[in-house]
Image (cartoon, rainbow, N blue to C red):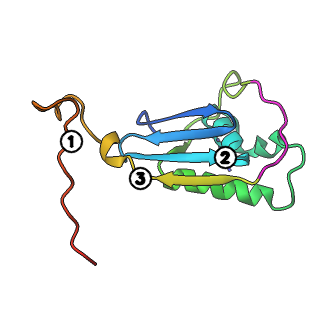
Amino acid sequence: MPAFQLASTDVTYQLLDGEVVAIHFTKGTYHSFRGAAAIAFDALATGTDSQDLMRLFVDAPAGASDELAAIVEKSIEAGLLAPSASAPAPEIGTRERSVTVWTSPLFETYTDMQQLLLADPIHDVGDAAWPRVAAAPEQPPK
């Protein structure tokens, strides 16, 4: 696996209490990474080469590298990570990280706030208040 970076400036994330919450503002989705997935996503987004991911875990079981590869693939499909065009600079990816006990990786995608995340707070302002988002058209029954 190559080195990665955040896919665009429309993607942001925060690592807090062992969970990464990543938001893709263009798509209006947000994602939760927990366990080994949170550590791996944070490491990749800050310049750690994907070849070094397994070194972040003290007791990763057999097959752990395949689980992390699946998380990376899901992150690419969600538009959160993209292969880096250049090799990471030595000062990138040096965030202090301790070796962590392996916890099964978990990746979840949420769309429940999509309408709010896609709202344009400048142009969607109406007389009633900010923000005023037009109601979504009803979907025909399936």
- Residue matched to label 3: 111
Q: How far apart are marks 2 and 3 (CA)?
A: 18 Å
Q: Earlier in the sequence, mark 2 or mark 3?
A: 2
Q: Residue 75, percent across and down?
A: 56, 50
Give the Cα distance between marks 3 and 1. 16 Å
Under circle 2, the secondary element is strand
Q: Name the residue under label 2.
A: 34
- Can you say whether 111 is above or below 19 in the image? below
Above or below, 60 relative to 139 = above
Q: Distance between the residues labelled 1 and 2?
A: 32 Å
* Predominant secondary structure, magenta span: loop
The answer to whether residue 125 is left or right of residue 88 is left
Q: Classify 65 as above or below 5.
A: below
Q: Which residue is drawn at 32% across and 41% down?
A: 116
Task: Specify few, some or many for label 1: CA neighbours under 10 Å numbering under 14, 14-19, or 20 or more.
Answer: some
In percent of the image, x 83 and y 31: which residue is there? Answer: 98
- Residue range highlighted in magenta: 96-103
| Kind of residue sitting beneath label 2 | Arg
Q: Which amino acid does the dot numbered 3 rest on?
A: Thr
Taking the view exactly as shown, the residue that stands out farthest to the bottom is 142
To which residue does mark 1 refer? 133
Question: Which element type, helix, strand or loop, lies under badge 3?
Answer: loop
